[in-house]
Amino acid sequence: MAFWSLFIALVGFFGSGMSKAPQLLLANALTLLVGVLALQIFSGNSGILSFGHVGFVGVSAYTTGILSMTPIVKQTSLSSLPVVLQEASFTFPIAMLCGVLVATLVGALSGLVIARLRDSASIATVGILIIIHSTLVGAEDFTRGSQTFYGVKRFTSVPVAATVAIIALVIARWFRDSKTGIHVRASRDDAIAASSSGVRIQQSQFKAWVLSAAVAGGMGSCYAGLLGAFSPKDFYFTLTLTLLTMLIVGGSGSVAGAVVGVVLVMAVIENLRKIGDSIGLFGLTNAGLAIIILLTLYIRPKGVMGFHEPEETAAYRGDSPILGEAVPLADALPSGEQVLVATNITKRFSGLVALDDANMFVERGKISGLIGPNGSGKSTMVNCITGISKADSAVIQLGNLKINKEKTWNRARSGLGRTFQNIRLFRELTVVDNVVVACISAGESVKDSDKSALSLLNQVGVLQHAYRFAGELSFGDQRRVEIARALALKPSVLLLDEPAAGMNPAESAELLAQFRQIMKQANAGMLLIDHDVTLIRSACDSLTVLDHGRVIAQGDPETVLSLPEVHAAYLGWGEESSDDENSTHNER
Amino acid sequence: MDALISYLVNVISLGGTYALLALGLAVVFSVLGLINFAHGELMTLTGYVLLAGILTGQPFWLAVLVAVIAGGISAALMEFAAFRPVRNASGATLLMTSFAVSMLLQVLFQNGISPRGQAVPVPTWLTTSLSIGNSQISKVQIMSITVGVLSLLALKFFFDRSYWGWAIRAAADDFEIVGLMGVKASRLIMFAFLLSGLLAGVAGVLWVIQRGSVDPLMGFKPVLAAFIVAVIGGLGSLTGAVAGGFILSAIEIALQTWLPPNVMPYRDAVTYTLVVIILSIFPNGIFGKKSQEKV
């Protein structure tokens, strides 16, 4: 970040000595950079494309224009403006502040809706753009409607634009690694894993949206002072296309990408404009932008700079992190107390009853096993307990808390850590950040989170990979990271969904020893789902058997496993069977 | 009473067009997760083909038929040329790709044909009106209602009875499962684009005939509306697309008819604000189901 700030400062410094035309070009590029950074804050971190930000740019541009114009100019250009605004005449910084403020307010209002949506959020942002655009066109008293709004002082010199750009850059880079920024990025990579790690997705996205609207407001003020005269169509799809192209070409996932994208795309636009003017082709720039986007998406979908800041990749090369002191995980409590009691769980998927009045408990310091044939409802049980699926009825008691009405993120923060049957890590985050996501949910500061994340990674034995990206790790190491992430919630209960899947007996024995160790340290209870009867038998202190959504046996593993009905449902074909045979068995 | 009749006529004729467009979007979304910005340019293209047909002296029905088919074929070509390279990419990538394709096509139309609108000489028998009771209803509107309703019925039949209709409906539920059932993904995707192009074609012809002209940006605005329609209906829901079309058209026409004159300039803003409010009440759309991701 320091590098890019210095870069912009130097550009600003030398740029102000240049002749008029390149100065204008430079100020324009710096202004656009502010907009691209605004988009990066929301779209880059959340993965949700926004077509609405140009609307915030427009709102702020008009506000800045109206407030900074002298009353004399306003009498001619905006004669029907309300008297208060007619007489107002602020200096640029104050007008800009007001512009940013108005953009922030509009952002907050629209954010209330956007944050609630998932698949359709991008389309809703198109709606936001249309609303703002038609309001600007309609509010003739303030904006002269679709006619040109003129008379704004051209105060956006290169140093002004450079200053605003540096501020935007600092904000964007700070946000990326802030608590909310890390949470938003986690939700981009995997929404389900994020909420299971205590991320309040809606709230985090809302914050990102409002902050980015504010930064877009910064661009709007500069843009007003750059253009001097403009109309609502300057804040519509062409500008949206320009900003999005810059974001995508550079790489939406990083602040560095925003800078690189602006430089590259500006170069292309300028040349195309000259060519277009000389041969008289209409809209050559737009066509050029469209082609650059397509090429980028086809050849290098993550953009020139990829998803990561250069310094993140550099940290990985440096390897071997410095360890802080081990953080104590939980207060020592007497074991044996029931920490999780789930009763009366029923879940129907239209006609199919997946869970029928099932129940389950976990004791502190002990491992409860959950077994059953494929499709017997094991994963559904975990999903109902964690709140990923909404149970039709359930009473779930976690310690002294009744959590069956809570959202997933809140259950996670209350001490319910889990892993997934099909590994769900935040693939584009570093290994250490994967764990940091959960540490933040547990209430730690970003700085403390780093330390405790590293010590957790050490504990599960993947410390050497701390600064690699989670998606690059081997299968077994990814499982270990998932466990570290679950532990970072300081859970009182750990739910492990087939943690030994794909491991050979030696590996699963090693894993088991690790579990015992972890439980002792975390002083948590554990719910273990697995198919491997040998593992279950040696690991579990108590056992629950599910069949067709019903609990058919519960109690001491040896006793349970020798029951004839358990044999019939599950063990009838012997203990050495693989999963394949298992499913054949169920179809019989 | 007359006001009500003319209101209903307007709602049904505009809503029918929106529904056709939104259905086209929904069909492609079901199989690919793509929200196609360039759907509007298919409409525009149909308009130009229709114009070419009429100008070269073809019979009207033939010009219409060729135009609609051209819409279908160009959609399939578009899939092949533009969307195949990003087939398995994220929704955001797909959306951005289609946005770029849309912008590119607009520039192509502007330079290849003309940046200005071209008048489309609609046959004179279509331009007269009929009087029902005391209200005048133009034949164009009657035709657009008839065609809209017939197309929707034909589609319903197609979705209920035919193999590909079944496959697309199933894909809207769960694309992967359809693949497991032995339906070839590539063919299904190609077919979905063909169908969506035909729908855009029908909508495009109706749009052009009602307005009597075609221009390079013609398709952009109605497709933005159709986006919103698809979202309020529930993305990927075929019933939702139709319902959403009529809901948006009912809101739009009501505001156009009854909004006080001093608020009239804000009509679009009011319409879309209402839509956004509907969305915040039904985040998955009115007919959308909560996306059930397998964990």
Image (cartoon, grey):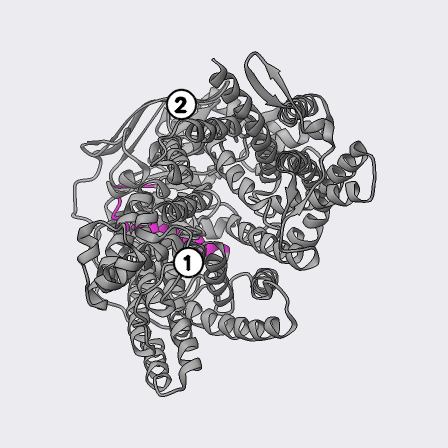
Q: Is residue A517 visible?
A: no
Position of residue A483 relative to residue A414, above or below, is below
Q: How dense is the environment of label 2, judged by Cα within 10 Å: few (below 14), some, or many (20 and up)?
A: some
Residue B97 among magenta residues? no
Where residue B97 appears, as percent x and y from the top left, is 58, 54
Do the dots labelled 2 and 1 sit on one chain? yes
Tag 2–tag 1 contact (CB < 8 Å):
no
Residue at 70% x, 25% y is B158
Tell me the SS state at disc 2. strand
Circle 1: residue type: Gly
User: Circle 1 is placed at which residue position?
Assistant: A44
Residue A482 among magenta residues? yes
Q: Is residue A70 left or right of residue A531?
A: left
Circle 2: residue type: Ala
Q: Quadrant of residue B159?
A: top right
Where residue A551 appears, as percent x and y from the top left, is 40, 22
**Magenta region:** A475-494
What predominant SS class does the magenta segment belong to?
helix
Where residue A50 appears, as percent x and y from the top left, is 43, 52
User: Circle 2 is placed at which residue position?
Assistant: A553
Position of residue A55 relative to residue B168, above or below, is below
| Nearer mark to the viewer, of 2 and 1 | 1
Marked residue chain, label 1: A
